Image (cartoon, rainbow, N blue to C red):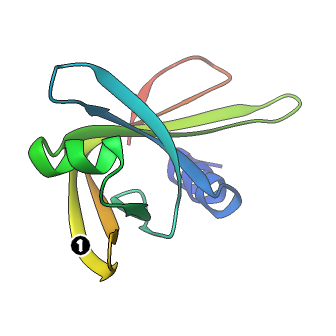
Amino acid sequence: MNDNERIEQLLNEQQFMVLAVTLDDGTPWATPVRIQAYNGHASFEWDSHLQTEHSKAIAKRPDMAITIFQKKETTQIGFYAKGKGELVEEFKPGFGRYRFTAEQSWVNDETFVKRKV
């Protein structure tokens, strides 16, 4: 199985990803969110309250990173990417659909070798 097939399998099995943003004071902030939609490993969408730390951070500084990972008995895989986040739509008062668009992405597995994808 090649890296793209393994990433697709990972995305089909995982419901959550971790967002990493930078707050106004420069503090790094990471938080898990439920993946609502994805387009290969190019973009990911999630829903969040507009007043969460990560939502406010994305509004001011869209540069961010994500990671999605899984460990099984003898295998493991991690997908991580850096890119831009944005509010796509406000679908009810106080809540919005957000999208992360990857600019660079990598995979790492039980070989512990980081590979660009």
Quadrant containing the C terminus is top left
Up-down relation of residue 46 to residue 31 (above or below)? below
Q: Nearer the viewer, residue 36 or 40?
A: 36
Q: What amino acid is at disc 1? A: Val
Q: Nearer the viewer, residue 79 or 44?
A: 44
Residue 104 sits in quarter:
top left
Q: Position of residue 9 (x, y in %)?
A: 65, 57
Q: Position of residue 31 (x, y in %)?
A: 47, 38
**How packed is label 1: few (under 14 Cα within 10 Å), some, or many (20 or more)?**
some
Q: Position of residue 17 (x, y in %)?
A: 52, 47
Q: Nearer the viewer, residue 115 or 91?
A: 91
Q: Residue at x 57, y 34 (%)?
A: 78
Q: Residue at x 57, y 59 (%)?
A: 8
Horizontal side, residue 110 vs residue 75: left or right: left
Q: Residue at x 10, y 45 (%)?
A: 60
Count the marks. Answer: 1
Up-down relation of residue 108 to residue 57 (above or below)? above
Q: Nearer the viewer, residue 41 or 90?
A: 90
Horizontal side, residue 34 vs residue 22: left or right: right
Residue 93 sits in quarter:
bottom left
Horizontal side, residue 52 vs residue 86: left or right: right
Q: Position of residue 6 (x, y in %)?
A: 61, 49
Q: Secondary structure at mark 1?
A: strand
Up-down relation of residue 110 to residue 41 (above or below)? above
- Looking at the image, the residue that sits furthest to the left is 60
Q: Residue at x 15, y 46 (%)?
A: 62
- Looking at the image, the residue that sits furthest to the bottom is 91
Q: Which residue is mark 1?
A: 88
The answer to whether residue 105 is seen in the rendering is no
